Image: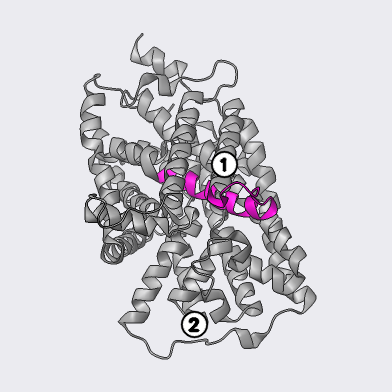
């Protein structure tokens, strides 16, 4: 079969409209982060102005990336998102390493993290039976959630899009309700919005803000998702830029308002004390609702966060597989991964492969948490004992946290940089949308990315180097796949 025939056979239909595109952004980003991360931010930045600044900077940083990526999505409306842009700008190897890392840890790790957060709140609503370990019960719920969203998106992209719209409406409505609740019930105090400023400005304060930024970026993570679906979005030159910019503006407003609402109701030390909780009913959102509504409020927020993380998980199942699909279509992944289901017209094999690996990460993470860490006399290398001990004390939803953010930030930075490369390499290529504020917008993103990655290498060197190792392991894999022959790359599907 010729490459042209193969590409025509694997073309995906355009079934997503502007509302679905917007909900992919908003619904994918709002997961468990805004319900959990504010406690970690309060611990690292113990003053209100610094907390607000971290959320604003994180939001503007993500918005700058989204406005830049919108140019690429409108210019090259093909399935695969960052993989497509990296290949067009830098060649096949960097693009493959992105897809490799996306599959092994970034996308599947995000899914495992979201599924674990879903399970945390599910376990509060439906406690584990007396003879079942709580972590095993939660792992079972996480696996069931991944299976559910995988099945939904195999059955149809339009079905996955409709689920995303309904879930986004639910979670945005829920957030707005939480924001106005203290105003309606009179449960907040302006006295809680203290200290307003730090006692001194020093390197320690900057270090705390950088540490907090990792969590904030995780809460904003997912803004790149829509571009993976560019081949399936109707009128991508118009709808992709509008959805990215409007979606990020909506998220920044909601996150800021929700964070201030938390601090309006709860004293800052009370929020900071919840930074390392392992139970969903003890997270900052749960305490917030308990102070306002009592035990019924805790049950309500558990249900809302459970639904929120499920919809965010669905967004990942909807968008992530397009990168592996595109790789296979270009000859850089097993060809069966780019198979389109004859009835449902979805990249079913790519969706199922992603779901399977995300489940395996969930199971492995659970084992590392449940199984007692080996002692120093076990015969294992000290590094492995140390890592296992650390993981044994880590909530499942935070297990892959740093790995996901470090790898995602690295490839997001390369993708944003490809705007400069492609404007020089292909200046005559049609650009329905040009990045607002160019070249300052992408430069802002790139400088912030370098600063953040440097801080992560300093503060979490083991996790960051492990993330780099996963990327490097893609080199021999690329050699194996590239031996299958050269592939054709075009700009329009």
Q: Is residue 271 left or right of residue 421?
A: right
Farthest residue to the front: give it: 377
Q: Is residue 390 left or right of residue 486?
A: right
Magenta stretch secondary structure, dominant: helix
Q: Is residue 239 left or right of residue 376?
A: right
Does the stretch in magenta take in 115? yes
Residue under the point 43% across and 75% down: 44
> Considering only vertical position in the picture, is 321 above or below 469?
above
For residue 88, which quarter of the picture? Answer: top left
Farthest residue to the right: give it: 185
Residue under label 1, please give it.
140
Locate the N terminus and report the quarter of the image it occupies. Answer: top left
What stretch of residues is rendered in magenta? 106-135
Image coordinates for residue 239, horizontal then vertical, percent? 56, 42
Image coordinates for residue 375, horizontal then vertical, percent? 30, 56
Residue nearest the viewer, comparing 17 with 102: 102
Residue under label 2, please give it.
47
Locate the C terminus and report the quarter of the image it occupies. Answer: top left
Does the stretch in magenta take in 450? no
């Amino acid at each position: 079969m010729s490459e042209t025939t193969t590409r025509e056979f694997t073309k995906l239909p355009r079934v997503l409209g502007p509302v679905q595109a917007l909900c992919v952004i908003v619904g994918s980003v709002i997961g468990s982060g805004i319900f959990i991360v504010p406690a970690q931010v309060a611990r690292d930045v113990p003053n209100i102005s610094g907390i607000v600044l971290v959320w604003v900077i994180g939001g503007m940083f993500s918005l700058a990336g989204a406005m830049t990526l919108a140019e690429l999505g409108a210019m090259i409306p093909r399935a695969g998102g960052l993989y497509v842009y990296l290949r067009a700008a830098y060649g096949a190897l960097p693009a493959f390493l992105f897809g490799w890392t996306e599959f092994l840890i970034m996308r599947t790790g995000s899914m495992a993290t979201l599924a674990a957060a879903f399970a945390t709140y599910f376990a509060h609503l439906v406690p584990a039976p007396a003879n079942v370990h709580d972590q095993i019960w939660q792992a079972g719920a996480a696996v069931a959630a991944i299976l559910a969203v995988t099945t939904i998106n195999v059955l149809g992209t339009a079905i996955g899009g409709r689920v995303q719209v309904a879930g986004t409406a639910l979670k945005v409505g829920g957030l707005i309700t939480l924001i106005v609740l203290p105003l309606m019930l009179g449960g907040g105090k302006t006295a809680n919005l203290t200290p307003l400023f730090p006692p001194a400005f020093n390197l320690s304060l900057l270090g705390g803000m950088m540490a907090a930024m990792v969590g904030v970026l995780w809460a904003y993570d997912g803004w790149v998702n829509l571009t993976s679906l560019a081949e399936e979005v109707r009128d991508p030159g118009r709808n992709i830029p509008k959805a990215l910019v409007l979606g990020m503006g909506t998220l920044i407003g909601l996150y800021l308002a929700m964070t201030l609402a938390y601090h309006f109701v709860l004293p800052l030390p009370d929020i900071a004390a919840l930074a390392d909780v392992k139970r969903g009913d003890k997270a900052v959102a749960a305490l917030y609702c308990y102070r306002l509504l009592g035990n019924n409020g805790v049950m309500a927020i558990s249900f809302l966060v459970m639904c929120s993380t499920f919809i965010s998980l669905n967004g990942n199942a909807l968008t992530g597989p397009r990168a592996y699909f595109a790789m296979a279509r270009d000859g850089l992944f097993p060809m069966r991964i780019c198979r389109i289901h004859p009835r449902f017209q979805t990249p079913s094999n790519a969706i199922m492969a992603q779901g399977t690996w995300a489940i395996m990460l969930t199971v492995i993470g659970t084992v590392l948490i449940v199984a007692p860490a080996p002692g120093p006399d076990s015969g294992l290398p000290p590094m492995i004992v140390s890592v296992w001990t650390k993981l044994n004390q880590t909530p499942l939803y935070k297990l892959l946290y740093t790995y996901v953010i470090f790898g995602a930030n690295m490839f997001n930075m390369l993708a944003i940089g490809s705007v400069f490369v492609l404007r020089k390499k292909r200046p005559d290529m049609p650009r329905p949308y040009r990045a607002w504020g160019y070249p300052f917008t992408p430069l802002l993103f790139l400088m912030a990315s370098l600063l953040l990655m440097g801080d992560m290498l300093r503060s979490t060197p083991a996790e960051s180097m492990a993330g780099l190792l996963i990327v490097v392991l893609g080199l021999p894999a690329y050699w194996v796949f590239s031996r299958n022959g050269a592939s054709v790359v075009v700009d329009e599907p």
